[in-house]
Amino acid sequence: MKPSLVAFAAALALTFAHAGVSLAEDASQANGNHAPEIGGQSWSFTPPFGTFDRAQLQRGYQVYRDVCANCHSMQLLSYRNLGEPGGPQFSPNAVEVLASQVQVTDGPNDKGEMFQRPARPSDHFRAPFANDQLARNANGGALPPDLSVIAKAREGGPDYIYALLTGYEKAPPGFDLAPGMHYNAAFPGHQIAMPPPLSDGVVTYTDGTKPTLDNYARDVSAYLMWAAEPKLEERHKTGARVMIFLIVFLVIMYLAKRAVWAGLHHRDARRAT
Amino acid sequence: MAHPSTYHPQSGAARWLDSRLPVPRLMHDQFLAFPTPRNLNYWWTFGGILTFMLGVQIVTGIVLAMHYVPTEQGAFNSVEHIMRDVNWGWLLRYIHAVGASMFFLAVYIHTFRGLYYGSYKAPREVLWILGVLILLLMIATAFMGYSLVWGQMSFWAVTVITNLFSSLDAVIPGLGTKLVQWIWGGFAVGGPTLNRLYALHYLFPFVIAGVVVLHIWALHIPGNNNPAGIEVKTARDTVPFHPYYTIKDGFALVAFILVFAAMVFYAPNFLGHPDNYVPANPLQTPPHIVPEWYFLPFYAILRALPNKLFGVITLLSSISILFFVPWLDTSKVRSTSYRPIYKWFFLAFVITCIALGYLGSQPPEGWYLVLGRIFTVYYFAFFLVVMPVVGLIERPRRLPGSITESVLGPEETKAVPAAAPHRRTPAEVAS
């Protein structure tokens, strides 16, 4: 192949790869001049073969329910999702119980009135506030974002969430912190309205895992990743099968191509027409 | 079409159909027996890959449309509903989203291949023009499709791009504003805008398919160009499309699908922007609005100019200038491989496009802006100065005598004078 063609191929490949990288840089640089450092954590669900850790997702749900859910909604999820394959996979009974612990508004009934009843697995997660205005009013003007796809809506995904939850620090001297705001090393601009949500011991773990801030942050980050990408395991599993099929198919096609063209490399290749 | 038909209907039914609607004859002549230059390299496989990608996007798109809700309140959540509750919905949606990127990757390679090998030169000007038209339609379709997700990037991309029309206010006061409101169906981007973008996003792929048919028709009249850029002279210069190019295109297609599948299954959001997983919010502008990677070079060109109207004109020119390439290039040879001076300008052009892509992703300030302007100037200079001037002053390298010679080398061809009876060499007798 001609050198210029090779250069051209390499260049195209680079653009393709680079676009993603530079977009990533943008998002982190966008807010604030110094991009916060987001360390990469080791997760059980990284491609190509990763799966979620069931126990970790169950603990993560517990952290969400006991802490995050007081302010943050997850409107795209239903209680039934907690029992589905590829997720925390609570038993059907456990899902019933987890749902029934929550009171949701239903109706109108025959009299035209709304009423409260225990949630069923088919109900969506109950939102802590009836509307955004109420949520803002209760949180000093800041709106706690819905967490359904938050792990895909932030650069760095679960790494970012973990860094944010463990990133609360004393503001460095000279840093101008607005009233009611908190200093966070991972948050773009470092001023976040959310007070530190987690601290050692706030959630009681029953499976022997140490109830530390670090474990809470890790578990709830994994849980939010599952919530954002509930078909991740199915995707990795299907992907492995598809890739094996394609690699075998590619080899067969290569051999077939060589066999068909072999005759042509001689001068008097007979014409097939 | 351009070559005598070699179709012989085998059965009575085939003869009956052949004299009424000769579709089997068309298929046989154009897709089985079609004489194709024997020296096409792998850069030529992208035509088949693009046809496949169009099919993939249409099939996955139709199924997605069955579940999608084109309303302000419903759009974002219906996409997530597809990802969560529709059987294999996550796969369909990721194939469609990554597919758009792969489609553009393929079409850019296809376009650069046409530029490098002079595939636009006579007698293939109409073929080239139809190709540029397809590129334009693809850009429009991809832009409209991206808006349907109705995330923050979708919404603000629509806002920025539709607002470009308001630059017409500088020509006739009020014209741009009126036009933009007509496009929006209101006084801001909203539900009516989304609904019409959805309707057009469904329509355009079929328009593309129609132009693709014309593109292939226009290809089959003069036949393929080839890496040597010389005409087919004897039947020995060609091979029938099937099995030679069906198998070669097939191999390349499987390799392409392998990369495509790796993206879909292992990095489906790598080329996307996290902000598009935040539902559209008209009250909150994202800190940095960037288009999808395949539009970044054009975005850099748009922002290189300080004046909005001139920026828009330059943006439109950067694509429509491709229509005039057949007449801008004055070279007597087609293939850049035989053009010792032009090939360096071509390489610089490829680097320019990549650099513009990078600059399009950066904020338009400081050195980024300066470099953006320099590369924009070269982008246009390549078409308006390099193409006409280098073609006139350059002395191309000697072209091979024939396509066969370009593949097998001159000595071997010399052993077979055109008129003389062919004598087999011992090596051939043995094989």
Image (cartoon, coloured by chain):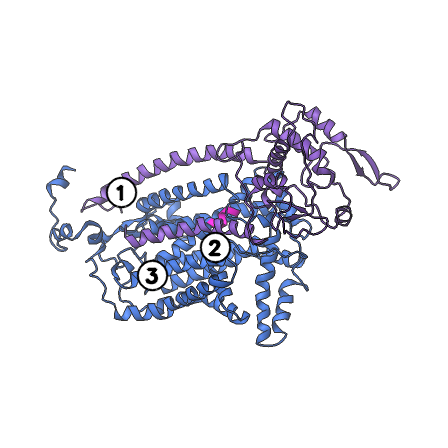
Query: Label 1 is found on which chain of the structure?
Result: A
Say whether mark 2 and mark 1 are on the same chain: no
Question: In the rendered view, does B131 fall on the left or right side of B331?
Answer: right
Residue B407 point in image, percent of width and height: 22, 50
Query: Foreground mark, 1 or 2?
Result: 2
- Please give the label number shown on residue B346: 3
* Horizontal side of residue A13 vs A174, given as left or right: left
Q: Colour of chain B?
A: blue
Q: Which residue is mark 2?
A: B294
Q: Residues within 10 Å of mark 2 (few under 14, many from 20)?
A: many
The residue singled out by tag 1 in the image is A261
Q: Amino acid at mark 1?
A: Trp
Task: Decide if residue B258 is in sight here.
Answer: yes
Q: Of residues B297 and A106, which is closer to you in this image? A: B297
> Does the magenta run of residues contain B99?
yes
Q: Quadrant of the N terminus of chain B?
A: bottom left
The amino acid marked with disc number 3 is Phe
**Frontmost residue, A155 versus A31:** A31
Range shown magenta: B97-101
Question: Of label 2 and label 3, which has the lower sequence position?
Answer: 2
